[in-house]
Image (cartoon, grey):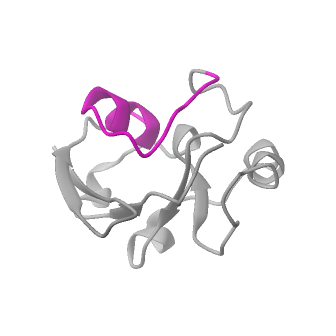
Amino acid sequence: MPKLVFRNTDGSEQTVEANVGASILQTALNNGLTGVLGDCGGACQCATCHVYILEPGLEQLPPMDGMEEEMLDCAASPRLAQSRLGCCVTIRDEHDGMVVQFPPTQV
């Protein structure tokens, strides 16, 4: 079971076990993390699960599809090169140790 490191805006970190096949959003919510909201329930409709994937994890992810690309333009925090929507990133074994940074705000 891969472990993800979630970094809060204050720099504190929480390491949690993630189920392969779950999304970053599901993993954060299932572990009681408050850095994402997921107001649309993970349907890629609201951009309230915006996260920053830090290197080297970013290079392990597949490219964004058009819907994720468009929704990131609506994110409340600045869109950066490492921006992804947590509902669109599915956890795989090779993501063990990936660091997910929460942005300053989701709304």
Instruction: Determine the residue positioned at 84% across, 49% down.
Output: 70
Whether the magenta-drawn stretch holds residue 15 is answered as no
Q: Is residue 76 left or right of residue 89?
A: right
Q: Is residue 103 left or right of residue 83?
A: left
Q: Nearer the viewer, residue 90 or 104?
A: 104
Q: Quadrant of residue 38?
A: top right
x then y, percent, for residue 89: 51, 46
Please determine whether, in this image, residue 44 is positioned above or below residue 40: below
Please determine whether, in this image, residue 4 is positioned above or below residue 40: below
Instruction: Determine the residue positioned at 29% across, 27% down.
Output: 30
* Magenta highlight range: 22-40
Residue 21 seen from this side: no
Instruction: Determine the residue positioned at 65% across, 75% down.
Output: 81
Q: Nearer the viewer, residue 100 or 1?
A: 100
Q: Is residue 44 left or right of residue 96?
A: right
Q: Nearer the viewer, residue 51 or 91?
A: 51
| Quadrant location of the N terminus in the rendered image | top left
| Quadrant location of the C terminus in the rendered image | top right
